[in-house]
Image (tube, grey):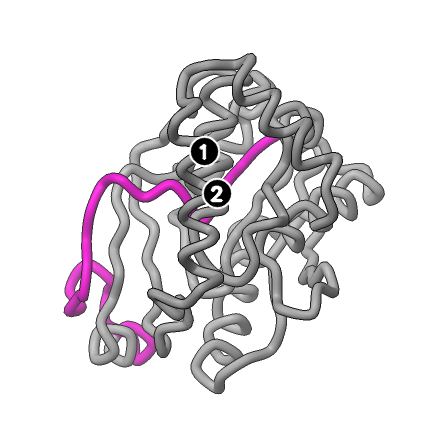
Amino acid sequence: MTAAVVIPWRPGTPERNAHHEYVRAHLHALLPDAVHLDVDSGHETFSRAGSRNEGVRQAQAAGADRVVLCDADTLPEAEPLHAAIAAATDGRLHLPYTWYRGLSRDGTDQYLAGTPADQCPTDLEHEWATGGILVIHPNAWWFMGGMDERMIGWGFEDAAARICADALLGPTVRHHGTITHLWHPQESDLGSPQHVANGQLCQRYVDATGKPEAIRALINQRDRQPA
């Protein structure tokens, strides 16, 4: 088994740059024998969808048969991550967590100073996250259509991909554990024309939830259009 760890990454704010180095070191410690890649698809506006797709391509070229797609601000736990990697032979999408912990600015400072994450203040905690870190076999990634690169910038690409995975691969598998998100200035640009367009495009996937033929038609349609 060869695993590749892909961080979609383009340098940004000082906070995000520092978090990237911390997360990268954390992943190296958890998976010292994996191939570790920082990937930027090169889109004019940084594309998380495009960079994840390009990361899977690079992982395949490196001979990986498991891909861990991890955001540069997100920390997984060891046990659920290893369990997800081991189980990804089943051709489904695996999420190595059941709980999302979003640290506050102060909480992030405390965590980086050595306080355990579960003792640090948070801005948001919930059990319905779909992104942050994904584990999958490369062939399964492409069978589910990868991610829709028409979703530019931040927002909705992971939700749309989850709908595709559930419809085409079978129900996504969650492994009990927590991911910890490090605080940084908000980049979502909520309410911008592009963010709204991403949401409208995602709604088309929502409307096709649980309908494999409809999902496949959406994927085929986007493949005929420029990203």
Q: Which residue is mark 2?
A: 201
Give the left or right position of residue 147, taking residue 227 as reference: left
- Count neighbours of disc 2 (C-alpha within 10 A) and say few if under 14, some if 14 to 19, many if 20 or more: some
Q: Which residue is mark 1?
A: 204
Q: x%, y% of residue 30?
A: 52, 51
Q: Nearer the viewer, residue 29 or 112?
A: 112
Give above or below for 9 relative to 80.
Answer: below
Quadrant of the snapshot with the N terminus: top right
Q: x%, y% of residue 202?
A: 44, 41
Q: Residue at x 66, y 40 (%)?
A: 3
Q: Amino acid at mark 2?
A: Leu
Which residues are the magenta region?
A: 111-136
Quarter of the image for residue 88 reads top right
Tag 2–tag 1 contact (CB < 8 Å)? yes
Q: x%, y% of residue 162?
A: 45, 33
Secondary structure under tag 1 reads helix
119 in the magenta segment: yes
Q: x%, y% of residue 48?
A: 57, 56
Q: Nearer the viewer, residue 197 or 52?
A: 197
